[in-house]
Image (cartoon, rainbow, N blue to C red):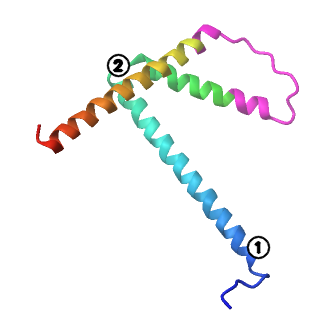
Amino acid sequence: DGETPAATRPAAGRRAAASREADARARAAEAEGRATTMISEAIANGTVQAVNFAVAQRYTEALEKIASAPNQKLILMPLEASGVIGALAGVAELAREALADGRSQSGARDAARDGV
């Protein structure tokens, strides 16, 4: 009758879930690769904000891992807040530059397509 037997439905569900998880991991890895490329290009062009962004990102990831450790109850560490704030400002600057570049490239493609 075209229906999947009840015994095979759980296995099909697990396969579908595993496939979705694999797709999500692949998309995350692809996004990380694009971000790394953008940061590398910005560093090559002498954009200090890219370095700040990379450092802030790794710093945040390290703090997250430390905070999520099950054996950690209290974490005391010096925090140089102005450095983190500066890195976040660098992220904002990179985002503005990326948006401006995207718009200018989009406009150039449209003009070329329209024969302008």
Which is nearer the eye, 111 or 6? 111
Instruction: Give, as a single range, the part of the protein colored magenta.
Output: 63-84
Q: Furthest-left residue in view?
A: 115
Q: Amino acid at mark 2?
A: Gly
Tell me which corner region of the image, top left, top right, bottom left or bottom right, holds residue 65. Answer: top right
Residue that numbered label 1 is attached to:
10
Residue count near mark 1 (Cα–Cα under 10 Å), binned few <14, some 14–19, many ≥20: few
Q: Amino acid at mark 1?
A: Pro
Q: Residue at x 35, y 30 (%)?
A: 41
Which is more N-terminal, label 1 or label 2?
Answer: 1
CA gap, disc 2 and disc 1: 54 Å
Which of labels 2 and 1 is toward the front? 1
Q: Dividing the picture into quarters, in which one does residue 38 lie?
A: top left
Q: Is residue 4 above or below residue 54?
A: below
Residue 23 position in % (x across, y down):
56, 57
SS assignment at label 2: loop
**Quadrant assignment, res 107:** top left
Which label sits on residue 46? 2
Which residue does the image show at 66% across and 63% down from the upper left? 18
- Where residue 75 appears, as percent x and y from the top left, is 81, 21
Of all residues, the one furthest to the bottom in this rendering is 1
- The image shows residue 64 at horizontal and vertical percentages of 71, 30
**Near-viewer residue (58 or 21):** 21
